[in-house]
Image (tube, rainbow, N blue to C red):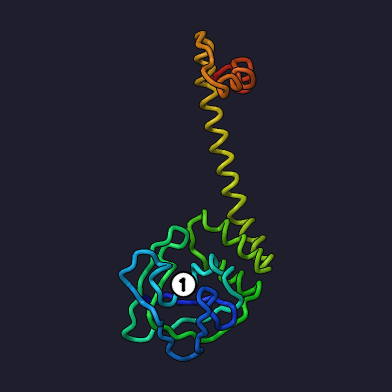
Amino acid sequence: MNNKRYVKVMFGNKSGANGFEYKIGEVNVTEYWNPNELDAKNMGGFNFSTEDKIIRWLVRGDTIYDVIIPEGSEVIDCPSESTPHGVFRTNRIIIVNPRLVTDEIAMELYKKSNLPEKSYFKAMAGCCVRGYINTAKQIFKDKIIIICLTIFLLFDILLTVSSVNRTREADKGIPPSNGYERFLDNTFNSKYLKNMFNNNWK
């Protein structure tokens, strides 16, 4: 294990997955552990995350704990597209320093977060569900608007390229072969492109 700070979120001190009641400040030992299982859900053990990834999982609890891994414990870094190197499982765990998650704590965790851009959608939704509205608004402002603008620009580029290509074909007398090409002929045709690009589109 490296120097990252490890944390865990749950409702109170009870697991939402199997009802296991954790002992705070003591070593908790799992009843089932199969580290060779490829599916993390069937691996057993205790799951936890890192301080820079936990924003994605705040929806799963109202209390956050610091995690200590006892010496000699097995730890598996579970593959996760939404939180790479942010989902771990172990056969022994100590949880300490319980704090009720507030909007302020959620905001601090967001500022420390390091997720793939697409994961912020679910992080924002999770914050909304848990009532961390200021954090959800900040994620929307910082991440979601940028993603939406990027998608819009990509769509605009795709539409422009396909319009130019189709208009060149239409000018050569090639008829439309599908509904999309008929749409382009009727909407983004040669007359439209000449006006849009000052007759410099060819």
Q: Is residue 24 above or below residue 157?
A: below
Q: Kindly identify which residue carries mark 1.
A: 50
Q: Quadrant of residue 87?
A: bottom left
Where in the figure is residue 111, as x and y percent of width and height? 56, 67
In this view, the residue farthest toward the bottom is 26
Q: Is residue 158 left or right of residue 196?
A: left
* Of the pair 56 and 32, the residue shown nearer to us: 32
In the rendered image, the vertical position of residue 118 relative to residue 112, given as above or below: above
The residue at 45%/77% (across/down) is 6
Q: Residue at x 65, y 75 (%)?
A: 102
Q: Residue 200 vs residue 87: left or right?
A: right
Query: Is the N terminus in the top left, top right, bottom left or bottom right quadrant?
Result: bottom left
Residue in view at x 34 percent, y 82 percent: 73
Residue 34 sits in quarter: bottom left
Residue 191: image x %, image y %? 63, 15
* Residue at (37, 86) in percent of width and height: 70
Q: Front-most of 24 and 14?
A: 14
